[in-house]
Amino acid sequence: MSELIGNLAAGEYGLLVTLGSFTSQAKTKAKANTRLIDGDELLDLVLAHYKDFDSAYKSLIPLKRMYVPQPTAEE
């Protein structure tokens, strides 16, 4: 995190992505021009934008939409 922030010039932005999670230290060090994306957020972003992916990327992450009915509450 320190290396990323140290290498950013004025007007540049940093992006750090992990499949895991960030320590509280890393979150504290993040500045306004630095974006942290953890595994949970990455998954949410992939699922939200999957339909817009190029077919080459979809072939790397083949997902299939499934619908699961939920029971309704009986009144």
Image: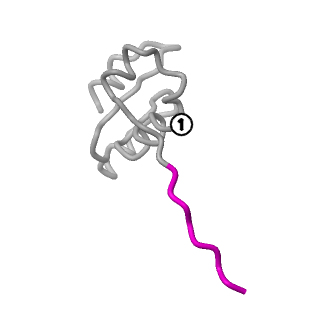
Where the N terminus falls, by quadrant? top left
32 to the left or right of 61: right
Main SS of the magenta segment?
loop
Q: Residue furthest right?
A: 75
Give the residue displayed 30% in from the left and 23% down from the top: 60
50 to the left or right of 72: left
Q: Residue furthest bottom?
A: 75
Where the C terminus falls, by quadrant? bottom right
| Residue 58 rendering spot, x and y as whole percentages | 39, 23
Which residue is disc 1 drawn over?
48
Is residue 69 part of the magenta span, yes or no? yes
Give the residue displayed 33% in from the left and 29% down from the top: 61
Q: How many marks?
A: 1
Give the residue displayed 33% in from the left and 17% down from the top: 7
| Residue 19 rendering spot, x and y as whole percentages | 28, 40
Q: Nearer the viewer, residue 7 or 35?
A: 35
74 to the left or right of 7: right
| Residue 31 rendering spot, x and y as whole percentages | 46, 34
Q: Residues within 10 Å of mark 1 (few under 14, many from 20)?
A: few
The amino acid at mark 1 is Ala
Asked which colour scheme the image uses, the reply is one colour
Q: Nearer the viewer, residue 42 or 68?
A: 68
Q: Is residue 74 above or below residue 9?
A: below
Q: Nearer the viewer, residue 29 or 36?
A: 36
Give the residue displayed 56% in from the left and 66% down from the top: 70
Q: Secondary structure at mark 1?
A: helix
Is residue 41 part of the magenta span, yes or no? no
Q: Is residue 30 above or below residue 15?
A: below
Q: Is residue 50 above or below residue 74?
A: above
Specify the segment rendered in magenta: 67-75
